[in-house]
Image (tube, grey):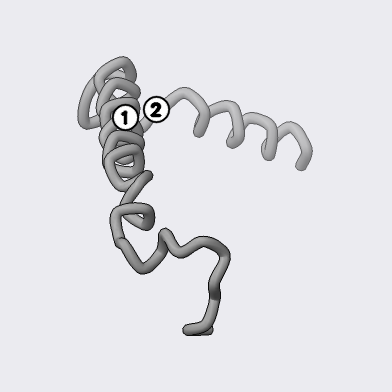
Amino acid sequence: MLTTLASVILASEEELAPLVAPAEVIAGVAALVFIMMGLVTFAYRDVANRHSHKKSSGNSAGH
């Protein structure tokens, strides 16, 4: 029984699933997506400081 299970496992490992693209292309696309998300995050890093009501000197009367 154990040898049958081992032979089934070994037979199933021989067939690899086909990829849409080579592994390097998939890694490159993933890297580009993360770089683009980082650039968007970087672009919005100073949005809160652009509003004049946020620059009050420690006065939190509105809150």
Which residue is found at the position 42% from the left and 59% from the top? 55
Amino acid type assigned to the residue bearing label 2 in the image: Leu
Q: Quick one: which residue is furthest to the left in this view?
A: 20
Which residue is found at the position 69% from the left and 32% from the top? 6
- The reply, left or right, for residue 13 in relation to residue 28 is right
In the image, residue 56 lies at what x, y percent? 45, 64
- Residue 24: name its quadrant: top left
- CB within 8 Å, label 1 to label 2: no
**Where is mark 2, residue-wise?**
16
Amino acid type assigned to the residue bearing label 1 in the image: Ile
Which quarter shows the N terminus?
top right
Which residue is found at the position 59% from the left and 36% from the top? 8
In the image, residue 53 lies at what x, y percent? 36, 68
Q: Vertical placement of 22 versus 20: above or below?
A: above
- The reply, left or right, for residue 51 in relation to residue 16 is left
Report crowding for label 2: few under 14, some 14 to 19, many 20 or more residues within 10 A (C-alpha): few
Q: Vertical placement of 44 versus 51: above or below?
A: above
Q: Nearer the viewer, mark 1 or mark 2?
A: 1
Which residue is found at the position 35% from the left and 36% from the top? 38
Front one among 48 and 5: 48
Q: Which mark is residue 35?
A: 1
Secondary-structure class at tag 1: helix
